[in-house]
Image (spheres, rainbow, N blue to C red):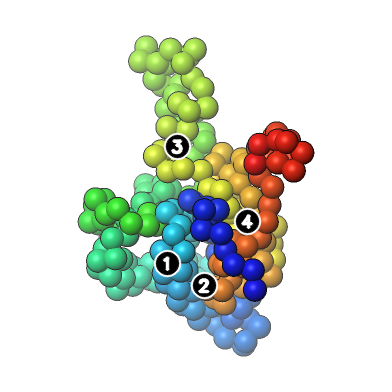
Amino acid sequence: MTSLIPDLIPKHVAIIMDGNGRWASQRGLPRFEGHRRGVEALRRTIRAAEELGIRYLTVYSFSSENWKRPAAEVSDLMGLLRRFIRNDLAELHARNIRIRVIGVKEGLAPDIVALLDESEHLTQSNTGLTFVVAFNYGARREITDAARLIAEAVKAGQLDPQAIDEKLFASYLNTDGIPDPELVIRTSGEQRLSNFLLWQASYSEFVFTAGHWPDFGRESLVEALLHYQSRDRRFGGLSSAIGGVR
């Protein structure tokens, strides 16, 4: 088997965790069991990311569109989030993992907001893997919120419109201070971003896997990284094979 090249491990990997429901349906299990097994897959993947030297791992845990799902399923997902934080936060902190949460907190249950805030506050000084949780997140909302804040700053005379460039705009996004992902992985065979990191993924490599999220783990992550390392990342330039910049 081809080995990973340590110097080409991406700094930031983002994952769209898809297929929990389909995984459960194929086995005649309730959708909740698929989500529960998905949490186990997340634990495996965080551990693997640490061991492989990835510095930032972002997961799409709950999109702003997921509120359209049946109320019982949304309630189950919120319950899983509560249990994950209460059961895993201390261990993640002990492993020097920093937690960042991106998304909109307005409208969430107060105890959910408190748990998310506690996760960020407790781990804010940690220097290991940064685990970014995209919760109640939608990229279009993120971008329009940034545009509105910039417009308000201009209107108040706090910002010169001529100073607005990509770097400044990015500083108004939820991901300020987090490098753009070099690799975006989506499980379950779907091949779309689904309103995830639209700005940040402009030059990301994409790997779409057929397997459902509950089956994901270290081997799946390594396979995706091998695909990534086989790519010729040109960023709009020429191929490195013909004298361009890799």
Q: Is residue 55 visible?
A: yes
Q: Secondary structure at mark 4?
A: helix
Q: Are marks 2 and 1 in contact (CB under 8 Å)?
A: yes
Pointer 3 or 2: first along the chain = 3
Q: Are marks 4 and 3 in contact (CB under 8 Å)?
A: no
Answer with left or right where residue 89 lies relative to residue 45: left
Label 1, residues with CA under 10 Å away: few <14, some 14-19, many ≥20: few
| Amino acid residing under circle 2 | Arg
Instruction: Identify the residue under disc 2.
Output: 218
**Mark 4–mark 3 distance (CA, rounded to whole Å):** 28 Å
The reply to whether discs 1 and 4 touch (Cβ–Cβ < 8 Å) is: no
The C terminus appears in which quarter of the rendering?
top right
Q: Amino acid at mark 4?
A: Gln
Residue in the picture at 61% in, 78% down: 23
Please provide percent x and percent y for residue 93: 26, 63
Horizontally, residue 221 falls left or right of residue 231, namely left
Q: Dot 4: few (<14), some (14–19), or many (≥20) neighbours within 10 Å?
A: some
Residue 16 can be seen in this image: no
| Earlier residue among tags 2 and 1 | 1
**Residue visible at 55% across and 53% down?**
8
Q: Earlier in the sequence, mark 2 or mark 4?
A: 2
Q: Nearer the viewer, residue 231 or 204?
A: 231
Q: What's the mark number on residue 51?
A: 1
Q: Say which amino acid is labelled 3.
A: Leu
3D distance between C-alphas at marks 1 and 4: 17 Å
Residue annotated with mark 4: 229
Query: Considering only vertical position in the picture, is 52 above or below 7?
Result: below
Secondary structure category for the residue under label 3? loop
Q: Mark 1: which secondary structure?
A: helix
Of residues 175 and 148, the one nearer the viewer is 175
